[in-house]
Every structure is written in structure tokens, then in C-alpha cells.
Image (spheres, helix red, strand yellow):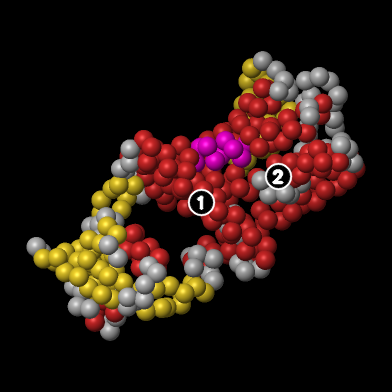
């Protein structure tokens, strides 16, 4: 059941991505010949207007085929009025941007929905105090509630670490509620080195406490919900962009590349952990699709945008033969990344299994 949900989630995200391209293409009078969810042999097709709406056998992507535009052969062009080829570079760029924009919009709407349902949080109660830690020396105790840090109110546990690391002071002041008492504790955090999400060594300040499992949820009003959704979409986008950047620089190894098996597996597991977990992960995948499609790789939206920017700046269209060979190189690169991802997925399964 989880795998079925994962495939449905992927299909919905792909549908919205392609719907973005379709909508703006039609807005500019471009004929869309095919709108397909999936690749390969079409298992269902319905003609609506000028467009064949299809579901294809391999549900790992999708495409819209516009008149005069064919990723498999960039030399297939048409100069009819309703062709993609005859549109201005700006119009083409807007058509290309519409797909990734639809993914960012989808993520934004999902994060907004989460904000209205209630974002899972932990209350700021101390669960454990590490021996010989700054918190232990300051006599913090289990079940103490952290009310404020440096006079900034604390409502949720995630604010504790953030406040400690953002504090400009060497000594951090904790306001603690213990039963009915309010206590003030001045604590000097210690610096530790640890690995971040990219496997890099970073320095962080800690005081030696961990949270008590007192779950709650944070609900937002409309305006704050919009801000939360915007911030989460932006943060997810920047995290994925940094991941790609660090992979290209060699800071993150090629063995960290995940493929479709990992995406389906993690989405399936998220669906088993409740609707909020599924919405969070779906939003992250949607942002991922948006960012990756903007990479300047021929055969992706970002590559086509680069060709059109070249035409916009120089006033000359890119050579069809150059576009053809670059697009073939782009497809080869994408295929290589997909195979690498699948190889890593299978490797992880074998090692883990």
C-alpha cells in the first residue's frame, strides 16, 4: 500500500509540474500535442481538444510535447503560428519556468496546509542532563521547563538549540521553571565538533541537555501560515541547492546520490507515519523537482532556459546542431545520474539487508 501511495504522490507532483508548462504554453497560443504522466508505452490516452492526455507505463516522470519542441530531437521544429519555435525567448523562458514554479507553489501550499493542521513540536522540558556538562554543573534537572534564554521567550524545544547557538554572549542566561519556582541559571556552553547533513565537520555550542518527549503542535493564523510556508519552501530549496553545489565541488560523495528506489521507499515509510509526515516529505520532493529542473543541463528546463537566454542576449538562435549534441550529452548525464542513484539504492538495500 505504501508503494502505491508513493507512486501516486510522484504522479501528482509530475502532473502539477507538467500542468505548469501546459498552462503557460496555452496562454501564449502554443499547441500542446501530448500531456503524459509517465514514459514509455501509453496505456491510456484521451483526446481533449488538440491535446492527447496520456498515462504511460513507466510512472517515473512525465512530459508535455509542444508543437515544434521535441527533447528527443531538438532539430524537429515547426514555424507555424501555434508552434513553440515561433515564440519569443521571453515567452519560451516563461513556459519553461512554469513547471518548476508549479512545484514550488505545490510545496508552498502543502507547507501552508501543515501550518493550519498544526506543526509537530516538542515542549521545552528537559528530559536528560548529561553528566559533567555545563547544564549538570549549573544543576539543571530532568523535567525543568525552559521559559526563556537571554530574555527571549521559549515556547518549543527547537528554539532552545537555536537560541544557544545564536547567542552573542559567552555566558547564556536560562530562565527555568521548576515546579512553581522560577530560577535563573547562567551557563557557559561548550563547543563541540560534529557532522552536518552534508557530512561536513561543523562547530556547535551545547550545554548538555536533551528533550523530554512532550509533544504538542503549533498552529498558525493565515498570515503567519503564509510566512511559515514561504520560509519552509525557501529553506528546502536552499538545502537542495547546497546539496547539489557540494556534490559538484566534491564535498559530498557520489555515494550519497539517491535514486527512485530511495524516493519511493522513503515516501512509502512517510505515508505509514501519518498524513503530516507524508505532506512534509511530499513538499520536500516537490521542491527537489523544482530545483533540479532549473539546473543548466540540456534536456532539463534549466538547459532550455540557457539556450533562450543566449538568444535573448545575442539576438541569435543557438545552432540547431549544437543544441542537438548538447541535449544528447544532457540526456546521457541524466541517465548516468539515474543509474548511479539506482546503484546506490541497491547497494544500501544489500548492506542494510
Relative side of 250 to 80, left or right: left
Q: Position of residue 160 (x, y in %)?
A: 32, 63
Q: Residue at x 42, y 51 (%)?
A: 269
Image quadrant of residue 192? bottom left
Provide the major secondary structure of the magenta segment.
helix
- Please tell me whether mark 1 sits on a helix, a strand or a loop: helix
Residue behind mark 1: 236
Q: Position of residue 278 (x, y in %)?
A: 42, 45
- Please tell me whether mark 2 sits on a helix, a strand or a loop: helix
Residue behind mark 2: 302
For residue 106: magenta? yes
Q: Which mark is residue 222?
A: none
The residue stretch that appears in magenta = 99-107
Q: Residue at x 52, y 62 (%)?
A: 349
Q: Residue at x 60, y 55 (%)?
A: 241
Q: Do the numbered discs 2 and 1 sit on residues whose CB atoms are within 8 Å? A: no
For residue 155: magenta? no
Query: Does residue 157 appear in this view?
Result: no
The one nearer the camera, 35 or 192, is 192
Relative side of 321 to 3, left or right: right
173 versus 303 height, above or below: below
The N terminus - image quarter: top left
Amino acid at each position: 500500500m505504501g508503494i502505491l501511495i508513493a507512486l501516486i504522490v510522484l504522479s501528482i507532483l509530475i502532473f502539477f509540474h507538467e500542468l505548469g508548462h501546459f498552462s503557460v504554453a496555452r496562454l501564449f497560443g502554443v499547441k500542446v500535442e501530448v500531456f503524459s504522466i509517465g514514459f514509455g508505452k501509453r496505456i491510456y490516452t484521451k483526446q481533449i481538444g488538440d491535446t492527447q492526455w496520456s498515462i504511460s507505463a513507466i510512472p517515473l516522470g512525465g512530459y508535455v510535447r509542444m508543437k515544434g519542441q521535441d527533447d528527443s530531437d531538438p532539430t524537429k521544429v515547426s514555424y507555424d503560428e501555434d508552434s513553440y519555435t515561433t515564440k519569443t525567448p521571453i515567452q519560451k523562458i516563461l513556459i519553461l519556468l512554469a513547471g518548476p514554479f508549479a512545484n514550488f507553489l505545490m510545496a508552498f501550499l502543502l507547507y501552508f496546509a501543515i501550518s493550519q493542521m498544526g506543526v509537530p513540536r516538542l515542549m521545552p522540558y528537559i528530559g536528560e542532563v548529561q553528566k559533567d556538562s555545563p547544564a549538570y554543573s549549573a544543576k539543571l534537572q530532568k523535567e525543568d521547563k525552559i521559559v526563556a534564554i537571554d530574555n527571549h521567550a521559549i515556547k518549543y524545544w527547537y528554539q532552545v538549540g537555536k537560541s544557544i547557538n545564536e547567542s552573542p554572549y559567552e555566558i547564556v542566561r536560562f530562565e527555568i521553571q521548576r515546579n512553581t519556582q522560577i530560577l535563573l541559571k547562567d551557563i557557559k556552553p561548550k563547543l563541540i565538533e560534529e557532522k552536518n547533513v552534508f557530512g561536513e565537520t561543523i562547530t556547535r555550542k551545547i550545554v548538555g541537555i536533551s528533550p523530554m518527549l512532550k509533544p504538542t503542535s503549533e498552529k498558525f493564523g493565515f498570515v503567519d501560515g503564509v510566512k511559515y510556508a514561504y520560509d519552509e519552501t525557501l529553506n528546502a530549496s536552499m538545502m537542495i541547492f547546497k546539496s547539489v553545489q557540494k556534490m559538484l565541488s566534491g564535498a559530498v560523495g557520489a555515494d550519497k546520490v539517491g535514486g527512485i528506489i530511495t524516493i519511493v521507499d522513503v515516501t512509502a515509510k512517510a505515508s505509514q507515519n501519518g498524513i503530516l509526515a507524508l505532506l512534509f516529505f511530499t513538499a520536500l520532493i516537490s521542491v527537489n523537482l523544482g530545483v533540479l529542473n532549473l539546473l543548466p543541463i540540456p534536456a532539463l528546463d534549466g538547459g532550455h532556459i540557457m539556450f533562450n537566454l543566449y538568444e535573448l542576449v545575442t539576438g541569435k538562435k543557438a545552432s540547431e546542431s549544437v543544441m542537438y549534441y548538447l541535449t544528447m550529452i544532457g540526456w546521457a548525464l541524466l541517465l548516468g545520474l539515474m543509474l548511479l542513484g539506482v546503484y546506490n539504492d541497491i547497494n544500501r538495500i544489500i548492506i542494510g539487508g
